[in-house]
């Protein structure tokens, strides 16, 4: 049971890290697409990609070497993580790869729009983590003071009942 909980926590953390890393990588990819085709852009972006994405990028390169024309080669990127925006961006990359340089500028512009949406979502995640941390900074002293007051109250009540019990006489 515990390993399942640990796995879920780890997967959530990795998914969050992937979500935070993807916008930067896609933006770099969009810049590389201005001068290169999709496969070369992916290959060039691998060296500077965040560590959390490198394995997925390597798998993507392998799939593209085997079946570059299949949409699934692109959409299987980050499949095990819940990042629907990544799937949309990968579909656009597939469209750019299939069309060549004809309407690539329009597709790259759409890709950049989706990347901007992902960056906004990533900022919301970062801000949420910061806000949670700030709330906890103020909550910890309150929790500590509450626990101390409860302990003091319990000890005080116990001592008071002991004193009252020892003051009473024996009833006949």
Image (spheres, rainbow, N blue to C red):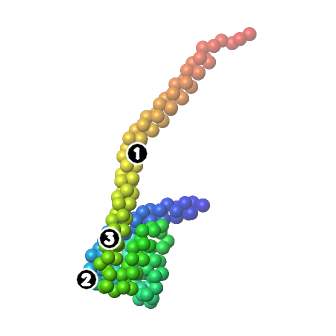
Of the two numbered discs 3 and 2 on the same chain, state the one appearing first in sequence.
Answer: 2
**Along the horizontal axis of the image, is 23 left or right of 143?**
left
**Residue at x 40%, y 38% (from the top left corner):** 141
Which part of the image, by quadrant, shows the C terminus?
A: top right
Is the Cβ of the residue at disc 1 closer than 8 Å to that at disc 2?
A: no
Q: Residue 22 falls in which quadrant of the image?
A: bottom left
As displayed, is residue 160 above or below residue 103?
A: above
Q: Secondary structure at mark 2?
A: loop
Q: Residue at x 40, y 45 (%)?
A: 136
Which residue is at the front of the view, 41 or 104?
104
- N-term mark: 1 or 2: 2
Which one is in front in this view, the residue at disc 1 or the one at disc 3?
3
C-alpha separation, residue under disc 1 versus residue under disc 3: 36 Å
The picture quadrant where one finds residue 83 is: bottom left
Residue on which the image places disc 1: 136
| Horizontal and vertical percent position of residue 36 | 28, 84
Residue 117 picture location, percent across and down: 36, 64
For mark 2, what is the residue? 35
Q: Which circle marks residue 112 in the picture? A: 3
The residue lying at 29 percent from left, 78 percent from top is 105
Residue 50 seen? no
Q: Residue shown at 34%/77% (left/top)?
A: 107
What's the distance in space between the residues labelled 1 and 2, CA to CA?
Answer: 48 Å
Quarter in which the N terminus is drawn? bottom right
Per the image, label 1 sits on a secondary structure element best described as helix
**Coordinates of residue 126 in the picture (x, y in percent):** 36, 57
In this view, the residue in front, 87 or 131, is 87
């Amino acid at each position: 049971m515990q390993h399942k909980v640990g796995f879920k926590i780890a997967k959530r953390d990795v998914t969050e890290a992937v979500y935070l890393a993807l916008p930067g990588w896609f933006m770099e990819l969009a810049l590389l697409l201005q001068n290169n085709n999709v496969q070369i852009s992916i290959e060039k972006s691998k060296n500077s990609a965040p560590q959390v994405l490198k394995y997925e990028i390597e798998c993507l390169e392998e799939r593209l070497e085997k079946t570059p024309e299949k949409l699934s080669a692109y959409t299987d990127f980050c499949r095990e993580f819940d990042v629907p925006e990544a799937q949309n961006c990968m579909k656009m990359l597939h469209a750019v790869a299939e069309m060549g340089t004809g309407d690539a500028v329009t597709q790259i512009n759409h890709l950049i729009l989706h990347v901007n949406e992902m960056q906004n979502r990533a900022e919301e995640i970062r801000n949420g983590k910061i806000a949670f941390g700030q709330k906890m900074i103020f909550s910890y002293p309150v929790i500590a003071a509450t626990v101390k007051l409860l302990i003091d109250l319990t000890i005080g009540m116990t001592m008071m009942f002991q004193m009252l019990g020892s003051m009473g006489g024996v009833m006949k």
